[in-house]
Image (spheres, rainbow, N blue to C red):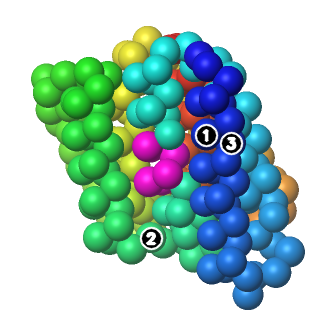
Amino acid sequence: MQHANLGLILITILCTFGLIFAQQRSKGVKIFWPICFLAIFQIGSTFWIDTEERFWIFLIINLMWTPLALDDFFNKSVPVWSLIISAGLSGIAFLYFNITSLNILVTVVVILLTARLIIFFIETMLSMQLIGGADYLAAFAFISSLHSHVIGYWIMLFSLLGILHAVRASRAQETIPLIPFMLASWCLVFSMTS
């Protein structure tokens, strides 16, 4: 990949983080940890991308999902319309850039709906929410672009990052925001398999 593309993604990601920092400046120093965390994964992963079309899809997905990831990190929720638009545009982008096919998108939707039903019954029995609705749409967007043989690595990596976050926070009952960890893991797995 050309050095101009690496420069472009570096500048774009840094500008995105700058805008998010300006918007969330009331959070003070607390905003630096998640921004640095995502920046390390996003910028570091760009060096493994070897084709032009994978570079552009990587850039588009990061621009759409970074604000949602930081919103999820700080507020433990994301705006519904932003989430639906990002998930829909992600699916369209994957189809446009031939990252995935319509059959795979339908398969992912069926699998996620089945998983949601199973988890719903478990949540009903336990009388508590285990996974938020936004996480399913994020999973749809990220899984749709990955090869089937690396989805397990993606799941293990974002789960490990979430567990490390919970340990770092040292609060066992704290709600763990999954979207930032899903995005960081997606960046690494997507770029390594390009």
Q: Nearer the viewer, residue 77 or 10?
A: 10
Mark 2 vs mark 1: give the one in front.
Answer: 1
- Residue at the spot of label 3: 10
Q: Amino acid at mark 1?
A: Ile
Residue 5 in the image: above or below residue 17: above
Which percent across, then down, holds residue 17? 67, 61
User: Do tag 2 and tag 1 residues touch (Cβ < 8 Å)?
Assistant: no
Kindly identify the residue that appears in the image at 49 percent across and 51 percent down. 63
Asked whether residue 160 appears in the rendered view, the answer is no
Which percent across, then down, holds residue 174? 67, 68
Q: Residues within 10 Å of mark 3 (few under 14, many from 20)?
A: some
Q: Nearer the viewer, residue 38 or 179?
A: 38
What is the distance, in whole Å, between disc 3 and disc 1 at their CAs? 4 Å
Asked whether residue 90 appears in the rendered view, the answer is yes
Label ID, residue 83: none
Q: Nearer the viewer, residue 124 or 52?
A: 52
- Residue at the spot of label 2: 78
Label ID, residue 9: 1
Kindly identify the residue that appears in the image at 61 percent across and 40 percent down. 9
Which percent across, then down, holds residue 11? 67, 48
Q: Amino acid at mark 2?
A: Val
Kindly identify the residue that appears in the image at 69 percent across and 66 percent down. 18
Secondary structure category for the residue under label 3: helix
Residue 152 in the image: above or below residue 142: above
